[in-house]
Image (cartoon, rainbow, N blue to C red):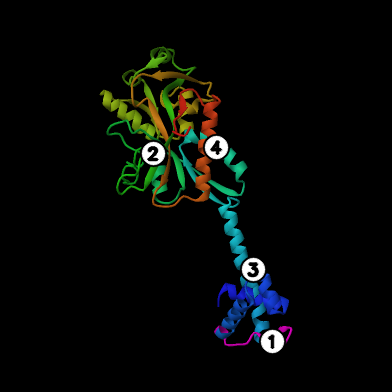
Amino acid sequence: MTLKQLVYFLAVADTGRFVQAAGDVRVAQPTLSRQIQALEDDLGETLFTRGRDHVTLTSAGETLLPLARRIVADVETARLEIAELAGLRRGRLRVGATPSLCVSVVADVLAVFHAAYPGISLQIAEGGSQDLVADIEDGQLDLAMVIHQPERPGGPTPGGAARGRAGSPGPGTPPAPGSTLRLTPVLREELVAVSATAGSANLDEALGDHAGIVELARHPLVINRPGYELREVVLSACAAAGVTPRIAVEGGEMDAVLRMVERGLGIAIVPSLVLAGRTGLRTTRLDGSGWTHRTIALAHRTDVAPTRAAEAFRETLLAVLARTSRTGGLPPGVRFIHPTG
């Protein structure tokens, strides 16, 4: 029994004539007759009583009729469901991003994406780059915006220190043998040091408008919890300069770090993206090379074909960032670096 045979069977049952049924389903009448005969042979029962000008259903045909209608209707429903999914009218998108990106870039992109594809269910995961990359490798996320610094020799790559994962490939490059990730660069952002505007006068004076890592290490430091790429950047910069940081508070997400700095618990090194609307913080530019800027990349697996929703998100992300860059809407210290931009 095939779906085609059931469609032909219903056409004959509805019209009562083989010739008219063949026209309705757009096949030659001999072809339709052969398929009906094959269906009867398969079932071992005659489905129609054939008259000179009209055919009627037998008892076996009457039994098959509601079942055939249900099967054909279910198949058509399945086709419509898949068509809706392929057309991005339904579906699911699982996106990860660091906290600094969730409150800035990602929120703006998701607003545009949701307006264009309101039927797509959005699931957002917030965390450090290492954790997010591990989640992509585990299949828990479709894609994620993570931090990557390929120019920092010997430094950890996203995922390199997470759950024993192998390091991920450089931005926009083919994955290394055995790796399942590709990182596509989209933004370049500046790191800055922040302190409380109402904090210690000596601290504010000591930092000034510019400061190097050696000078910063003399002051109490508020640092993110393990799993944040920014934490590794700061600690690696201190180690490279031969200084030991004075850690006042260790742990917490980005909002918590900024709040602790505002309360005068210490200074922190943060991306410039997170400073919009933070009037209680004083900004100090960082002296140095390599570690004072970082790349934001879109990460996804290469061993699994992306969903239509994931492809649409990538296109939306690049379009929004390119437009924002052209209109001068990116925050100070942030620039769009995708080659198509």
Q: What element carries label 3?
A: helix
The magenta region covers 42-58
The reply, left or right, for residue 15 in relation to residue 137 is right
Is 209 magenta? The answer is no
The kind of residue tagged 1 is Arg
Residue matched to label 4: 109
**Mark 2 or mark 4, which has the lower sequence index?**
4
Say whether marks 3 and 2 touch (CB < 8 Å).
no
Q: Which residue: 36% across, 48% down?
A: 180
Residue 3 visible to the viewer: yes
Q: Name the residue under label 3.
A: 73
For this orientation, the residue located farthest to the right is 53
Mark 3 vs mark 4: in front: 3
* Element type where label 4 sits in the image: helix
Distance between the alpha carbons at the discs numbered 3 and 4: 39 Å
* Pointer 1 residue: 50
Q: Are marks 1 and 3 in contact (CB under 8 Å)?
A: no
The circle on residue 172 is: 2
- Residue sitting nearer the eye, 108 or 256: 108
Q: Which of 15 and 300 is in front in this view?
A: 15
Dot placed on the residue nearer the N-terminal end, 3 or 2: 3
